[in-house]
Image (cartoon, rainbow, N blue to C red):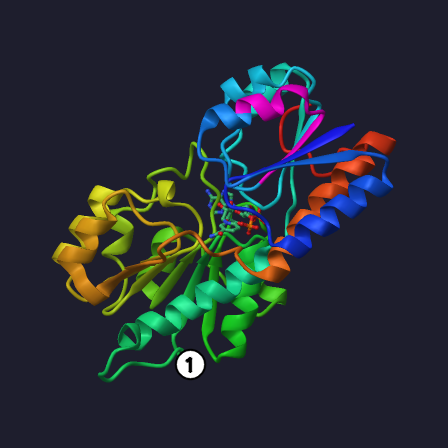
Amino acid sequence: MKILVATEKPFAAAAVNGIREICRAGGHEVVLLEKYTEKGQLLKSVADADALIVRSDKVTREVVDAAGRLKIVVRAGAGYDNICLDACTERGIVVMNTPGQNSNAVAELALAMMIYMSRNCFTPGTGSELRGKKVGIQAYGNVGRLVAAKAKALGMEVMAFDPFVPAEKMSEEGVTPAETLEKMYSECNFISLHIPATAETRGSIGYDLLTRMPAGGCLVNTARKEVINEAELEKALADRTDLKYVTDIAADCQAELNEKFGKRVFATPKKMGAETAEANMNAGLAAARQIVEYFATGCTRFQVNAK
Ligand code: NAD
């Protein structure tokens, strides 16, 4: 089978070598399309691919239509909102992600962002410490759980909100389950977002939640920009001059936020949560293994679209 690795933002070279080895050992051929700049390049390359590995690359209906032989797409990462699931399902194409493979990298970045904002963006002046502060984890999945564990190690108090995770599981791990999202926002000095972008979560973080935060509250977003209501974020930052916002996914209005709110806001220049050598390796190799296993045994363990 022909496995296309299409990455606008390439994997580290060691990860690409590992992907090649795994695929070759499974009897498959790997074709690389890296740093492409036009959609046309992807449409052309995908035409004769049996499998596709992507990162944040957009697999739209147009891409699926151009991929006449495609049987499986693996998103090397957690979020799969860059893939048109309906188009894949209609064609019987399996879509998978690689859950948990880059979580540690994202969790470390979330904690780093809290420290950065607590220390005046590393400029002179008196900052504050994380120890003794309270963090609310919004979504207790792979990343959220790791942020919770690391925050506890730093001496923080941890709360979490996730309607799909039993409260007992959080309690067993030393995390206080929040009865409501509103309560968590009103009590926590930091809120760390780990919700996926879904129909329910898009635009769901806005003025009402943000202005419940205690003085000096800081919202940390390593999830997706789409979950924020940007107009309401801007209004909350304007009305509450103590609030802070730090994100790994720049807002559409980031330039305006930076200009208006200075050191109270910060966005990484390019999404970098999963940009570590370790996460590249973990997610890339997992994607290759999942494809080889699918072709060998039909295993669909990590399938995320409807069967
Ligand atoms: P995960 O699938 O392990 O966990 C997601 C959690 O969200 C689950 O526990 C689920 O129950 C919960 N959830 C779903 N809807 C919810 C809701 N409405 N309210 C509260 N909880 C809800 O995913 P993960 O690996 O922890 O990643 C979380 C998100 O982080 C991803 O969806 C992705 O968007 C983002 N992410 C960003 C980067 C980056 O580079 N910045 C890297 C990886 C993941």
Q: Quadrant of residue 221?
A: bottom left
Q: Quadrant of residue 281?
A: bottom right
Where residue 38 appears, as percent x and y from the top left, is 44, 29
Extent of the magenta region? 43-54
In the rendered structure, the answer to whether residue 204 lies left or right of residue 85 reads left
Q: What residue type is disc 1 on? A: Arg
Callout 1 secondary element? loop
Check residue 50 for magenta coloring: yes
The answer to whether one can see residue 306 in this image is yes
Decide: is 38 above or below 162: above
Position of the C terminus by quadrant: top right
Nearer the observer, 146 or 134? 146
**Which residue is depicted at the point 49% across and 72% down?**
151
In the rendered structure, the answer to whether residue 126 lies left or right of residue 290 reads left
**Which residue is depicted at the point 29% across and 61% down?**
266
State the residue position of label 1.
131
Q: Quadrant of residue 227?
A: top left
Position of the N terminus by quadrant: top right
Nearer the observer, 107 or 295? 295
Check residue 264 for magenta coloring: no
Decide: is 307 above or below 125: above
Decide: is 95 above or below 7: above
In the rendered structure, the answer to whether residue 232 lies left or right of residue 274 reads left
| Ligand 1 closer than 8 Å to label 1 CB | no
Where residue 286 appears, as percent x and y from the top left, is 71, 47
Disc tally is 1
Q: Residues within 10 Å of mark 1 (few under 14, many from 20)?
A: few
Where residue 190 appears, as percent x and y from the top left, is 36, 65
